[in-house]
Amino acid sequence: MSGDGTARIPLLLVLSALLLILLGTLEFSAVLLRLAAVCLGLSVLLLTLLWKRRQARRESDFANSVCETLDALMRGREPENYRPYEDSQLSKALGKLVQYHDQAQAGQRQSEMDRQTIQELVSDISHQVKTPMTNIRMFTDILRRHELPEEKRAEVLATLAAQVHKLDFLMQSLIKMSRLEAGTFTLHVEEASLYDTIAQAAGGVLAAANRKRIRITVDCDSRETVRHDPKWTAEALGNLLDNAVKYTPEGGSICISVRPWQFYTRIDVADTGMGIPAAHYHDVFKRFYRAQPSAAAEGVGLGLYLAQGIISRQKGYISVKSEVGKGSTFSVFLLR
Amino acid sequence: MDIAAVHNLKKYFNAGVRQVKAIDGIDLSIEKGKLTAIIGASGSGKTTLLNLIGGLCRPTEGTVTVDGVDLGTLGEDELTVFRRRKIGFVFQGCGLVPELTVRENILLPLALDGSWPDAVFLEELAGLLGLTKKLDCFPCQLSGGGQQSTAIARSLLTKPAVILADEPTGSFDARTSRNVAGLLKMTAETFHQTLVMITHNLELAQLADHVVCLRDGRIAQ
């Protein structure tokens, strides 16, 4: 606690006293001067001792306060001596300790939440797998036990294939989700063409869109580049487009537009589908969420959840604006 | 876990012979590490509520607790120190000092507290907000969005318990609003900060984890 400057003050005073003694030997009133010098020297010595003792006590008080705070934090109690509103060095130091402890606690809470998430996830997965598995078992039994006419047999096989496809789709989505949640996929962020990424995403839904006579238009400068992971971003955009195709009626349209902004590049995916009520804007990004009217359409409720996860891992975000009966616009914001 | 809470909060102003009930009995909890948006029409009490949470004004009745401290028990000087250490502010008008560089503006709250900056954190923050090459510029040399990014960095650098943003995008066009709101959310999320943002823009409120709607000084159901 005592700095070099404060330690030099008593030294200077002792030197002054010695100087006075020296002067005293030269002057006429030598006795008086010598006496004054001795008194001064003794006072300086006393002051130095008192100063040192005070400093030692302050250091000890500081250390004790830090220890008390640490003890309280380790026992999970609120530290009694921490006053974040005090303008002192001690309050500042204790503030850092409390902040550090809070961060460690937050880490523990996150682990607990992760554990809970995994439990919920297992429950959700078993629920999702149950229906196609039951159907597969039922249709396999029908095929095994009954002699069916060729036409009926083909129909049951087609249903069986659809259930297997659904299960496969679910498993693929779950693998991606698990990689996303566990953070095991590595993003390869690079300055790449957004046009190519959009083309890759749109290519995946083109056949389904053609079947429903849905027109897809792209408004994007082919020279437009942005820092992103092309593969995963195409996956996220693909999920948005997949939803747009699913929920847009026959003959509708989907428009993809790109606008470079100051901090973000905005990619809009606008459809002329059934729309989403404002009250469900938040819900649509939740895992396994499926709105009632959309329950009939194929899907497991992971597409938007995955898309948001992929984009937020790249420090971007997704928002939605919609009008029921007229269509929805999902906007992806990629950090420039 | 809640980082801030208000209980039975009331704030009345005297306007001549009439008494204006700006906040009229609000109970609210702000969850740690989340983004809470406060929405409502003009005059619904949004800014007054934020000022009360931030200790910028005293309530007529009720309590405000931030990070375990009841603000009503603090004197003016203590409240000033508490605000400096525990609360980050982002205002509509940025509130930057024009004579100071971007770096000096960001470091100002720490300098006032006699503290040293966390150099690594400053570097990380500047990188995330796109300010690395602009640290030695003056605010007037930046765009509106750039100035607000500086204000965001300033509010985050002290690692406060809660950041209060009063219409941080209010003076910008729709495009810059989305830009700045996105940056604010992204940085708060990256550094696990608690953010309370006032907005009248329902599209921006969508970014929040929790939305509180005020009407005539009360929470609308």
Image (cartoon, coloured by chain):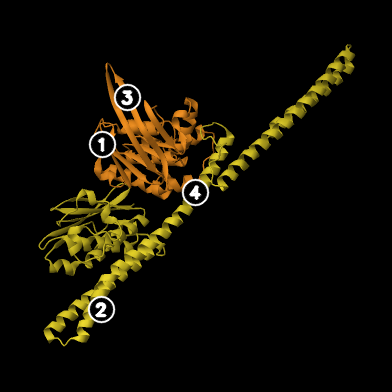
Q: Residue at x 11, y 63 (%)?
A: A250
3 and 4 marks in contact (CB < 8 Å): no
Report the amino acid beneath label 1. Answer: Gly
Q: Tag 4 or tag 2, which sits nearer the N-term? A: 4
Q: Colour in which chain B is shown?
A: orange
Q: Which residue is mark 2?
A: A137
Q: Which residue is mark 3?
A: B12
Q: Colour in which chain A is shown?
A: yellow
Q: Could you say which is closer to the camera, residue A160 or residue A16?
A: A160
Residue A69 figure quarter: top right
Q: Residue at x 28, y 16 (%)?
A: B16
- In three-dimensional space, the C-alpha distance between marks 4 and 1, rounded to whole angstroms, equals 33 Å
2 and 3 marks in contact (CB < 8 Å): no
Could you tell me which chain the residue with mark 4 belongs to?
A
Q: Which residue is mark 1?
A: B40
Q: Position of residue B61 (x, y in %)?
A: 37, 27
- Mark 1 lies on a secondary structure that is strand
Both on one chain, marks 2 and 3?
no
Report the amino acid beneath label 2. Answer: Arg
Q: Residue at x 19, y 76 (%)?
A: A159
**Label for residue A103?**
4
